[in-house]
Amino acid sequence: MTKIGIILGSTRPGRNGEAVAKWVYELAQKRDDATFELVDVADYNLPLYDEPFPAMMQQYTKEHTKVWSNKIKEFDGYIFVTAEYNHSIPGALKNAIDYLNVEWKNKAAGFVSYGSAGGSRAVEHLRLVAAELHINDVRAQVMLSLFTDFENMSTFTPDPRHEGSLNDVFDQVIASSNSLKTMQS
Protein backbone atom coordinates (compact mmCIF):
# COMPACT_ATOMS: atom_id res chain seq x y z
CA MET A 1 0.00 0.00 0.00
CA THR A 2 1.13 3.55 -0.68
CA LYS A 3 2.86 5.11 2.32
CA ILE A 4 2.75 8.87 2.86
CA GLY A 5 4.87 10.78 5.38
CA ILE A 6 3.31 13.84 6.99
CA ILE A 7 6.39 15.95 7.72
CA LEU A 8 6.10 18.57 10.45
CA GLY A 9 8.72 21.19 9.68
CA SER A 10 8.66 23.67 12.57
CA THR A 11 10.73 22.82 15.62
CA ARG A 12 10.33 25.92 17.76
CA PRO A 13 8.86 25.72 21.27
CA GLY A 14 5.16 26.62 21.30
CA ARG A 15 4.82 25.96 17.59
CA ASN A 16 1.37 25.92 15.98
CA GLY A 17 2.48 23.25 13.55
CA GLU A 18 2.04 20.37 15.95
CA ALA A 19 -1.74 20.92 16.15
CA VAL A 20 -1.92 21.34 12.37
CA ALA A 21 0.08 18.16 11.70
CA LYS A 22 -2.08 16.17 14.13
CA TRP A 23 -5.21 17.47 12.34
CA VAL A 24 -3.75 16.35 8.98
CA TYR A 25 -2.87 12.95 10.45
CA GLU A 26 -6.32 12.48 12.05
CA LEU A 27 -8.09 13.22 8.76
CA ALA A 28 -5.67 10.93 6.93
CA GLN A 29 -6.65 8.06 9.24
CA LYS A 30 -10.17 8.15 7.75
CA ARG A 31 -8.77 6.99 4.40
CA ASP A 32 -8.16 3.45 3.25
CA ASP A 33 -6.20 4.13 0.06
CA ALA A 34 -2.84 4.78 1.76
CA THR A 35 -1.09 4.57 5.10
CA PHE A 36 0.17 7.70 6.80
CA GLU A 37 2.84 8.41 9.37
CA LEU A 38 3.54 11.66 11.19
CA VAL A 39 7.24 12.55 11.01
CA ASP A 40 8.33 15.41 13.26
CA VAL A 41 11.63 16.98 12.20
CA ALA A 42 12.19 17.95 15.85
CA ASP A 43 12.45 14.25 16.79
CA TYR A 44 15.57 13.81 14.62
CA ASN A 45 17.77 16.44 16.28
CA LEU A 46 19.51 17.33 13.04
CA PRO A 47 22.28 19.90 13.57
CA LEU A 48 23.09 22.32 10.77
CA TYR A 49 24.18 20.16 7.86
CA ASP A 50 27.36 18.50 9.07
CA GLU A 51 28.14 15.82 6.51
CA PRO A 52 31.53 16.11 4.74
CA PHE A 53 30.10 15.11 1.33
CA PRO A 54 27.19 16.47 -0.70
CA ALA A 55 23.93 14.64 -0.01
CA MET A 56 23.66 13.45 -3.61
CA MET A 57 26.67 11.17 -2.99
CA GLN A 58 24.89 9.34 -0.13
CA GLN A 59 28.21 8.89 1.70
CA TYR A 60 26.72 9.59 5.09
CA THR A 61 29.10 9.54 8.05
CA LYS A 62 26.79 10.67 10.85
CA GLU A 63 24.31 8.41 12.61
CA HIS A 64 21.61 11.12 12.66
CA THR A 65 21.83 11.39 8.86
CA LYS A 66 21.53 7.63 8.41
CA VAL A 67 18.47 7.50 10.67
CA TRP A 68 16.85 10.43 8.82
CA SER A 69 17.66 8.88 5.44
CA ASN A 70 16.16 5.52 6.40
CA LYS A 71 12.96 7.19 7.61
CA ILE A 72 12.47 9.30 4.48
CA LYS A 73 13.22 6.35 2.16
CA GLU A 74 10.22 4.49 3.63
CA PHE A 75 7.69 6.77 1.94
CA ASP A 76 6.18 6.95 -1.53
CA GLY A 77 5.13 10.57 -1.02
CA TYR A 78 4.96 13.39 1.50
CA ILE A 79 2.71 16.07 2.87
CA PHE A 80 4.78 18.91 4.26
CA VAL A 81 3.23 20.88 7.12
CA THR A 82 5.03 24.20 7.21
CA ALA A 83 4.89 27.52 8.95
CA GLU A 84 5.81 30.68 7.13
CA TYR A 85 8.74 32.46 8.76
CA ASN A 86 9.72 35.78 7.15
CA HIS A 87 8.17 34.87 3.78
CA SER A 88 9.83 31.44 3.67
CA ILE A 89 10.03 28.03 5.31
CA PRO A 90 11.47 27.34 8.77
CA GLY A 91 15.23 26.87 8.71
CA ALA A 92 14.88 23.49 10.43
CA LEU A 93 12.73 22.18 7.58
CA LYS A 94 15.12 23.43 4.90
CA ASN A 95 18.04 21.90 6.79
CA ALA A 96 16.22 18.54 7.10
CA ILE A 97 15.42 18.53 3.39
CA ASP A 98 19.02 19.44 2.47
CA TYR A 99 20.43 16.50 4.43
CA LEU A 100 19.15 14.17 1.71
CA ASN A 101 18.88 14.03 -2.05
CA VAL A 102 18.21 10.70 -3.72
CA GLU A 103 15.73 9.73 -1.00
CA TRP A 104 13.34 12.46 -2.23
CA LYS A 105 13.69 11.73 -5.95
CA ASN A 106 10.58 10.76 -7.94
CA LYS A 107 8.25 11.04 -4.98
CA ALA A 108 5.13 13.20 -4.70
CA ALA A 109 4.51 16.02 -2.26
CA GLY A 110 1.64 18.17 -1.12
CA PHE A 111 1.61 21.13 1.23
CA VAL A 112 -0.32 22.34 4.25
CA SER A 113 0.85 25.75 5.37
CA TYR A 114 -0.03 28.32 7.97
CA GLY A 115 0.87 31.92 8.65
CA SER A 116 -0.37 35.48 8.38
CA ALA A 117 -0.81 35.02 4.61
CA GLY A 118 -1.76 31.36 4.91
CA GLY A 119 1.83 30.26 4.46
CA SER A 120 1.57 30.78 0.70
CA ARG A 121 5.08 32.21 0.35
CA ALA A 122 6.59 29.31 2.29
CA VAL A 123 4.97 26.90 -0.15
CA GLU A 124 6.29 28.93 -3.09
CA HIS A 125 9.80 28.34 -1.75
CA LEU A 126 9.13 24.68 -1.02
CA ARG A 127 7.96 24.16 -4.60
CA LEU A 128 11.30 25.50 -5.88
CA VAL A 129 13.23 23.19 -3.56
CA ALA A 130 11.01 20.27 -4.56
CA ALA A 131 11.69 20.88 -8.25
CA GLU A 132 15.44 20.76 -7.70
CA LEU A 133 15.12 17.44 -5.85
CA HIS A 134 12.86 15.86 -8.50
CA ILE A 135 9.89 15.87 -6.14
CA ASN A 136 6.59 16.03 -7.99
CA ASP A 137 4.56 18.65 -6.14
CA VAL A 138 0.80 18.54 -6.58
CA ARG A 139 -1.44 21.51 -7.32
CA ALA A 140 -3.85 21.25 -4.38
CA GLN A 141 -2.75 22.77 -1.09
CA VAL A 142 -4.21 23.91 2.21
CA MET A 143 -3.44 27.43 3.45
CA LEU A 144 -4.38 28.21 7.04
CA SER A 145 -4.57 31.77 8.31
CA LEU A 146 -3.28 32.73 11.74
CA PHE A 147 -6.17 35.23 11.86
CA THR A 148 -9.12 32.97 10.98
CA ASP A 149 -7.97 29.40 11.67
CA PHE A 150 -6.33 30.03 15.03
CA GLU A 151 -7.90 31.57 18.10
CA ASN A 152 -5.57 34.31 19.38
CA MET A 153 -3.06 33.12 16.75
CA SER A 154 -2.28 30.07 18.89
CA THR A 155 -5.23 27.67 19.34
CA PHE A 156 -5.93 25.78 16.13
CA THR A 157 -9.60 26.03 15.12
CA PRO A 158 -9.66 25.27 11.39
CA ASP A 159 -12.53 26.37 9.22
CA PRO A 160 -14.44 23.19 8.26
CA ARG A 161 -14.02 23.98 4.53
CA HIS A 162 -10.33 23.10 4.81
CA GLU A 163 -11.21 19.42 5.22
CA GLY A 164 -12.32 19.26 1.58
CA SER A 165 -9.12 20.98 0.44
CA LEU A 166 -7.05 18.56 2.50
CA ASN A 167 -8.81 15.61 0.92
CA ASP A 168 -7.89 17.06 -2.48
CA VAL A 169 -4.25 17.14 -1.34
CA PHE A 170 -4.50 13.51 -0.19
CA ASP A 171 -6.10 12.45 -3.49
CA GLN A 172 -3.45 14.14 -5.60
CA VAL A 173 -0.46 13.03 -3.52
CA ILE A 174 -1.65 9.42 -3.48
CA ALA A 175 -2.38 9.35 -7.22
CA SER A 176 0.94 10.98 -8.04
CA SER A 177 2.83 8.69 -5.65
CA ASN A 178 1.31 5.64 -7.29
CA SER A 179 2.21 6.91 -10.75
CA LEU A 180 5.80 7.62 -9.75
CA LYS A 181 6.52 4.24 -8.15
CA THR A 182 7.84 2.84 -11.43
CA MET A 183 10.46 5.63 -11.59
CA GLN A 184 11.89 5.05 -8.12
CA SER A 185 15.21 3.27 -7.89
Image: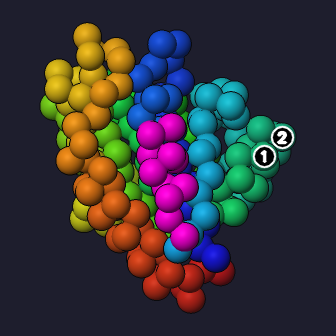
> Magenta region's main secondary structure?
helix
Q: Is residue 157 left or right of residue 183?
A: left
The crowding category of the residue bearing disc 2, from other C-alpha atoms within 10 Å (few below 14, some 14 to 19, many at least 20), is few
Q: Amino acid at mark 1?
A: Val
Task: Name the residue carrying label 2.
Answer: 63
Task: Name the residue carrying label 1.
Answer: 67
Q: Residue at x 34, y 45 (%)?
A: 112
- Which image quadrant is residue 41 in? top right
User: 184 or 116: nearer the eye?
Assistant: 116
Q: Is residue 113 left or right of residue 173?
A: left
Q: Amino acid at mark 2?
A: Glu
Q: Residue at x 25, y 11 (%)?
A: 152
* Quarter placement of the N terminus: bottom right
Q: Residue at x 30, y 27 (%)?
A: 157
The answer to whether one can see residue 29 in this image is yes
Q: Is residue 138 left or right of residue 60?
A: left
Whether residue 146 appears in magenta in the rendering, the answer is: no
